């Protein structure tokens, strides 16, 4: 009994301690996410009614026609009924109507959510999935970021939709932020589209929803919804090139001399690599390694010293830097605000 109680306690408590970043689809923060939740409740209600009808009938017949206690066992076959036209019509018509209603409701919702009709004033973002991080390009604003998508929040008298153009650089990924929208696949050599919208400010967690390799589970997304004024200020900073701060020349030289500059871009500097995330304003992000680690000096040092320790199988190579070189490199990266 004790073991059963312990197992039950672990199952109940698991969602609380397993991962504070677990995406939540039951508290939507956008019209599309609300529509998806209502569809889920509709399907759940219909399924529950069918379960109760079938399960209830089964339980009734088991109890009603069971052998009385002490009665001799009767293995004879009960009377069989064949060719009941009303019953055959009923069990054909009922499922057909249920499937038809659900199909019409889902099709209506999908058409509304996947509309590609331009909306005045919407923000355009091109999202590219890589193994295992996200690239976000703001084509109308002229800059690129990684892993953390910043969007303006809708206001009382003005919605702020974000039109997402989804592409993949390697394998199939899937963009999913449950509180803001449904999930959409990113397929190589194909462009898919979707819309995001946040009605309240906040940080919305998401993740890749299609298995894409070793680090699929650590390919996280963070959408930060802020006021229009805060977004404009953030965008103005992102447009700027990196500023070389005094006192970090050693770290800057390490970055440019090593393979770092071949994989990463730092605008305004000779680094123009495209294989890894754009680091021009690295310290404006709250996480590194696609949301796996908080962005601070300690984690940045650990990440540079041994990327496999935090993200086994990551394409980020171990550069075999000495502790002094790691410190100097971190000193330089910490200035990229």
Image (cartoon, rainbow, N blue to C red):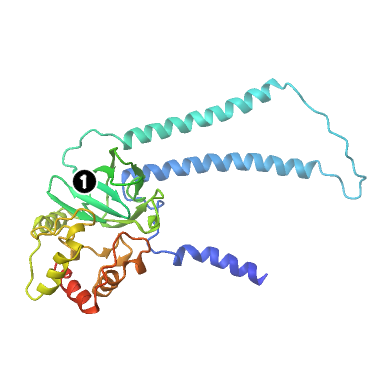
Q: Position of residue 282 (x, y in %)?
A: 19, 63
Q: Is residue 102 left or right of residue 311?
A: right
Give the vertical position of 219 relative to 35 (above or below): below
- Which secondary structure, mark 1? strand
Question: Can you give x and y, in whole percent of width and height, for residue 309 in the image?
Answer: 36, 69
Residue 264 appears in the picture as rendered: no
| Residue occupying the point 28% across, 53% down | 134
Residue, x 15% and y 66% (percent of image)? Answer: 257
Q: Is residue 203 above or below residue 112?
A: below
Camera-side residue of 119 and 323: 323
The structure residue drawn at horizontal position 14% and vertical position 55%, both measured from the top left corner, is 272
* 1 to the left or right of 295: right
User: Residue 273 placed where, x, y %?
Assistant: 18, 55
Q: Residues within 10 Å of mark 1 (few under 14, many from 20)?
A: many
**Does residue 91 appear in this view?**
yes
Q: Label 1, on which residue?
A: 125
Q: Is residue 21 left or right of residue 272?
A: right
85 or 7, which lies in front? 7
Q: Position of residue 8 (x, y in %)?
A: 59, 65
């Amino acid at each position: 009994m004790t073991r059963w109680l312990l197992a039950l306690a672990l199952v109940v408590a698991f969602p609380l301690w397993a991962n504070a970043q677990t995406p939540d689809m039951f508290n939507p923060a956008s019209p599309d996410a609300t529509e998806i939740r209502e569809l889920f409740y509709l399907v759940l209600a219909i399924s529950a009614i069918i379960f109760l009808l079938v399960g209830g009938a089964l339980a009734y017949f088991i109890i009603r026609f069971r052998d009385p206690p002490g009665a001799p066992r009767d293995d004879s076959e009960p009377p069989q009924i064949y060719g009941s036209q009303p019953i055959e019509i009923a069990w054909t018509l009922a499922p057909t109507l249920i499937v038809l209603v659900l199909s019409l409701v889902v099709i209506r919702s999908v058409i509304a959510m996947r509309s590609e009709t331009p909306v005045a004033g919407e923000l355009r973002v091109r999202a590219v999935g890589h193994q295992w991080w996200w690239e976000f390009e703001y084509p109308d604003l002229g800059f690129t970021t990684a892993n953390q998508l910043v969007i303006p929040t809708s206001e009382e008298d003005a919605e702020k939709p974000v039109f997402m153009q989804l592409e993949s650089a390697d394998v199939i990924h899937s963009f999913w932020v449950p509180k803001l929208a449904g999930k959409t696949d990113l397929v190589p050599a194909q462009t898919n589209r979707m819309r995001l919208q946040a009605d309240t400010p906040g940080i919305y967690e998401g993740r890749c929803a299609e298995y894409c390799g070793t680090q699929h589970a650590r390919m996280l997304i963070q959408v930060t919804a802020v006021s229009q004024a805060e977004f404009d200020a953030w965008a103005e900073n992102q447009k700027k090139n990196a500023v070389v701060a005094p006192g970090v020349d050693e770290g800057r030289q390490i970055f440019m001399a090593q393979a770092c500059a071949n994989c990463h871009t730092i605008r305004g500097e000779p680094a123009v690599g495209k294989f890894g995330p754009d680091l021009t304003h690295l310290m404006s992000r709250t996480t590194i390694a696609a949301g796996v680690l908080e962005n601070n000096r300690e984690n940045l040092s650990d990440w540079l010293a041994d990327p496999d320790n935090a993200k086994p199988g990551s394409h980020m190579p171990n550069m075999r830097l000495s502790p002094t070189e790691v410190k100097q490199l971190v000193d330089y990266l910490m200035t990229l605000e």
